[in-house]
Amino acid sequence: MSARRLQGLVLLAGAAATWLLLDSADIGFHWTPFVLGVVYLVAALLGGPGGSYWSTAVVLTVFGLGPVARFEYEVDLSAASIYVVALGVAVLLAGRMAERGFAITQTAVGATIVALGVVFALQTELDVITEPGLYAGFLAAVGLLRVVRS
């Protein structure tokens, strides 16, 4: 089985796991970026350093630690400061990984950060933004496209 097809299957399985995990009463919306990042990280690992999804995986996983630290572990700093630090660490890590041959681009890192900003800006305006099904649906769509195109 090709790595691309396997990545698609991981994203499809990750969509189901994301929905189940985030829909649980014990886990709040603040876990969403980290959970999505881990799913993308598994898919990226299957593609190897030159494969897809590294930029998204690194940014979502590292940034995702910020909201988890703030809300789960009650770190006594402003959410904004934690998020900016987490994004800075994500960008630094992505840059180092790109220097070491991982398929990471500034454009993909920036696009992921912009998407995070839009999601967090809209979370108080649109109830659907905090629905786990939205993110599970996006993951499933990406996974299905990956399987079909491989």
Image (cartoon, grey):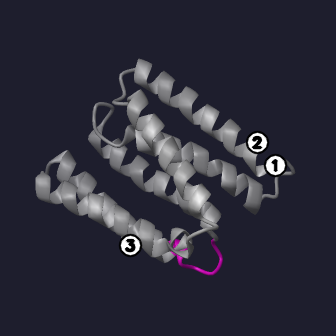
- x, y percentage for residue 53? 35, 43
The answer to whether marks 2 and 1 mark residues whose Cβ atoms lie closer than 8 Å is yes
Q: Which mark is residue 16?
A: 3
Q: Amino acid at mark 3?
A: Ala
In this view of the protein, can residue 17 be seen by the observer? no
Mark 2 and mark 3: Cα distance apart in space: 32 Å
Which residue is identified by label 2? Answer: 81
Q: Main secondary structure of the magenta part?
A: loop
User: Is disc 2 surrounded by few (<14), some (14 to 19) or many (20+) residues within 10 Å?
Assistant: few
- Left or right of residue 21, residue 53 in this image: left
Which residue is identified by label 1? Answer: 78
* 93 to 119, vertically: above or below: above
Residue depicted at x 43% and y 44%: 56
Q: Amino acid at mark 2?
A: Ser
Whichever of labels 1 and 3 marks the residue nearer the N terminus, that label is 3
Helix, strand or loop status at disc 1: loop
Residue depicted at x 31% and y 66%: 140
